[in-house]
């Protein structure tokens, strides 16, 4: 059975469906993963030492502090190099940005942007640039498994899952590798609330919602919870509801969801003005353009 079949085969047991993003939404793991695991290896694998300061700042802007927050790691590499190539520090040093056209090509033709699909592609094309991307991605996973543990879910996450469990089928909707998701959700005993843990190997977040939930529940009974514009986009693409976990105010967002959001969602009083106001506030938090541009 393919991962898409697993999503398509999800049958509703409850009247509602809730998709939950993991990094930066359920868990406070964004900063540690990006700053300690992704970014140092990004600099190392692409030889960015001569422009390390700008590379680090650009990586963190893309992955943590911009509208790209939460994007797939391979798309993040592309976006970071795009912004980095325009930076004064890079031009002043005559630094040549690595050629990532092979990665670009792969991401244009594939939606399951994870190591399994990339490893299969690497075996097929035998391209050193693709090999480099795969080696980087594997090393990031290895570092995450060694560095990122013992981080509990945000306060009011478990309480919210417990409150929803008799009413909603729940699924993890993430662009993190499945093995890390499984480890993190199991470590804190919250995997038992979910029907499926869908990571990057299952396709995009929009596809997760489309195949697992769309058409199986009324649109107003499907809710995506996330901390990034990509999560909102996944909900909008499918015409379903979105609850924002605001970066920097995650605890307040979850407490508000537990105390008010859940009741509103389960009584059809969430969509409309209430949701619109939350999304409008959320959309102001993450800029499109970096401050140095
Ligand atoms: Mg996230």
Image: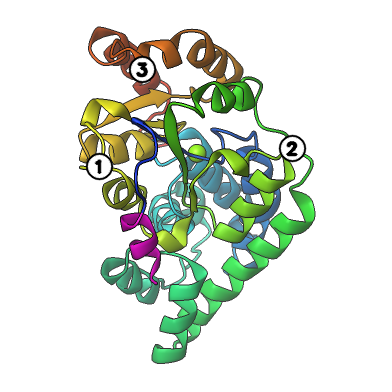
Q: Which residue does the numbered mark 1 point to in the structure image?
A: 216
Residue 119 in sight from this viewpoint = yes
| Mark 2, residue position | 151
Q: Quadrant of the N terminus?
A: bottom left
Query: Up-down: is 125 above or below 76?
Result: below
Q: Residue at 33% across / 30% down in the picture? A: 15
Q: Residue at x 30, y 47 (%)?
A: 206
Considering depth in this image, is 133 or 196 the residue closer to the camera? Answer: 196
Sequence-wise first label, 3 or 1: 1
Task: Name which of mark 3 and mark 2 comes first in the sequence.
Answer: 2
**Which of labels 3 and 2 is toward the front?**
3
Say whether residue 39 is visible.
no
Residue 55 magenta: no
Q: Residue 84 — which label?
A: none
Kind of element beneath mark 2: loop
Task: Please name which of the two marks, 1 or 2, marks the residue nearer to the observer.
Answer: 1
Crowding at dot 2, Cα within 10 Å, few <14 / some 14-19 / many 20+, comes out as: few
Residue receiving disc 3 = 265
Q: What stretch of residues is rendered in magenta?
A: 1-9
Q: Residue at x 37, y 17 (%)?
A: 266
Question: Which color scheme did the rendering employ for the protein?
Answer: rainbow
Q: Nearer the viewer, mark 3 or mark 1?
A: 1
| Prevalent SS, magenta region | helix
Of 226 and 185, which appears nearest the observer? 185
Q: Tell me the distance, in whole angstroms, between the alpha carbons under discs 1 and 2.
A: 34 Å
Q: Can you say whether 38 is above or below 47 in the image?
A: above
């Amino acid at each position: 059975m393919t991962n898409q079949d697993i999503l398509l085969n999800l049958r509703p047991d409850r009247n509602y469906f809730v998709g939950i993003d993991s990094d930066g939404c359920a868990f406070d793991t964004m900063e540690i993963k990006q700053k300690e695991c992704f970014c140092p290896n990004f600099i190392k694998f692409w030889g960015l030492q001569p422009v390390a300061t700008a590379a680090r700042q650009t990586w963190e802007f893309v992955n943590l502090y911009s509208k790209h927050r939460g994007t797939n790691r391979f798309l993040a590499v592309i976006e970071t190099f795009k912004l980095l190539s325009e930076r004064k520090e890079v031009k002043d040093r005559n630094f040549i940005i690595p050629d990532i056209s092979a990665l670009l090509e792969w991401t244009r033709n594939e939606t399951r942007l994870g190591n399994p699909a990339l490893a299969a592609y690497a075996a097929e094309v035998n391209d050193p640039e693709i090999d480099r991307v795969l080696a980087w991605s594997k090393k990031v996973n290895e570092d995450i498994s060694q560095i990122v543990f013992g981080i509990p879910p945000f306060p009011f996450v478990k309480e919210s899952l417990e409150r929803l469990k008799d009413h909603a089928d729940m699924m993890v909707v993430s662009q993190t590798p499945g093995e890390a998701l499984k480890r993190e959700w199991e470590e804190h005993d919250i995997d038992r609330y979910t029907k499926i843990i869908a990571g990057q190997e299952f396709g995009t977040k929009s596809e997760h919602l489309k195949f697992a939930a769309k058409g199986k529940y009324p649109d107003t009974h499907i809710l995506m919870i996330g901390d990034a514009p990509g999560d909102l986009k996944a909900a909008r693409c499918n015409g379903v509801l979105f609850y924002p976990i605001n970066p920097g105010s995650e605890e307040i967002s979850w407490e508000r969801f537990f105390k008010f959001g859940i009741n509103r969602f389960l009584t059809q009083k969430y969509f409309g003005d209430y949701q619109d106001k939350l999304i409008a506030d959320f959309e102001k938090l993450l800029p499109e353009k970096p401050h140095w541009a």
